[in-house]
Image (cartoon, rainbow, N blue to C red):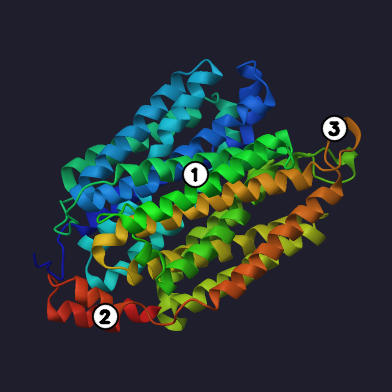
Amino acid sequence: MTRSLERANYKATFAVLLLGVSAYALLQSLVTPILPTIQHDLHTSQSTVTWVLTAYLLSASIFTPILGRVGDMVGKERMLVVTLGALALGSVMAGLAHSVGLLIVARAIQGIGGAVLPLSFGIIRDEFPATKVATGVGIVAAMAAVGGGAGIVLAGPIVSHLNYHWLFWIPLIITVIAAVCAQLFVPESPVRTPGRISWLAAVLLSGWLVALLLGVSQAPTWGWASSKVIGLIVLAVVIGVAWVIAELRSKQPLIDMEMMRVPAVWTNNLVAFLFGMGMYSVMAFLPEFLQTPKSAGYGFGASIIQSGLFLMPLTVTMFFFGLLSGRIAAAVGSKSAVIMGSIASCGAYLILAFAHEQPWEIYAASTLLGVGLGLAFSAMSNLIVQAVPPAQTGVASGMNANIRTIGGAIGAAVMSSIVTSQLVANGLPAASGYTTGFAFLAAMTVVAILAAFFIPTATAAKADSDHEPHLQNAELALLAGGTIAEG
């Protein structure tokens, strides 16, 4: 089917996608600063309340690539509505939850909403004019990252003036509006991948992700050398190998391993993994550092609201540079944008590690990190979309987002082990723990810089032309000279 150069409703489609991504992104981080409040109100333990985050990560890791693949098969718009419906259901359950068990189940259901990202990227590629694809993907990717920062900023005022249940009711309102508008205004895509879901691959994918994330998320509690953690990691490796074999042998794989070996795909996935380690870790532990009483010899004794304000520059600059990423990539190339973002992020972690005694130093690090994340996330999303044929856009971008989540889970677990390795008075971490932890994040970002240099400078223009016979010649020319050339 031929896609016209101009889609009359692509701007309305874009508004709907931004609403859905905003709701999912807010739910990623809104609960992080107020876990102690939830623990107190629901009369549970610290180890149990961490499952409010773990269940969300596990669910998102499993459903993001699977629903991205289903969207490629049955229709991205249809699956977008289903995904937003699951996100809404989970939010209702979480808003009504008065036990930690029900809240954990609700968060697992919310994690299904992770598929909103790959589905959105696929819809943008299918529906937008060719010259608008890079900018659209960049803004959606930036919105996903901004929501993480915004959640931490907004959590304090919401809890202070209402209660923690409103951390779920407010995103619910946004989600319902987005779901209704998606049903009414987002057109069905002409791009489909026929076939069936490989359920063996889906089960194996779920198995190794659950084993890996369960092991690393509980490692700070159980100990990295404990038999439980080692056993789960070994189990993850075994099931992971079985999953790869099953995918290679399948005529209709859930994740095309040939696609995963494309240089532009695997290099961006590696950078995304390392970026995920840093982003999730800093959003989890920087507020904790800021809220530490000054009597501990470090920290600022900030309230939840005040610690959120320290992260306000991160949110603002992340969104601003996400908006500009398309123009920056057009000027210097998407690969260069990833490298620039990696360097900026590394500088931010170094400041947090070695210059964190004055408020302006935290603000400077927050600003620099926002620049880095905004540039890199948008550029990486564009590179992935450009590197694969439209039929694989959902699953490729889904795995990229998923790998970032896995990196975040592992990074946060390692960061937790480092920070809590030495305690001082009142059970607070020693200042050296935070210094070492942020330095570790800087080191991981140095690896990301090196990996970014291996990203190919040319994207798969030929692959697109081979797999997109429905495109008009004029549109192929725009792709070749416009968004594809940005890589």
Q: Nearer the observer, disc 1 or disc 2?
A: 1
Q: Which residue is mark 3?
A: 427
Q: Would residue 251 appear left or right of 60 to someone viewing this image?
A: left
Where's residue 294, x and y in %?
86, 41
Name above or below for residue 350 compared with residue 71. Answer: below
Q: Would residue 154 appear left or right of 15 to someone viewing this image?
A: right
| Residue under the image location 35 percent in, 31 percent down | 88
Q: Nearer the observer, disc 3 or disc 1?
A: 1
Name above or below for residue 136 compared with residue 422. Answer: below
Q: Which residue is mark 1?
A: 209
Q: Would residue 406 appear left or right of 199 to someone viewing this image?
A: right
- Circle nearer the N terminus (3, 2): 3
Q: Amino acid at mark 1?
A: Leu
Q: Is residue 121 visible?
A: no
Residues tagged 1 and 2 counted as in contact (Cβ below 8 A): no
Q: CA distance from mark 3 to mark 2?
A: 59 Å
Which residue of the protein is positioned furthest toward the left in this rendering? 1
Question: Please, what secondary structure does the residue beneath circle 3 have?
Answer: helix
| Residue under the image location 68 percent in, 26 percent down | 46
Q: Is residue 273 visible?
A: yes
Q: Nearer the observer, disc 3 or disc 2?
A: 2
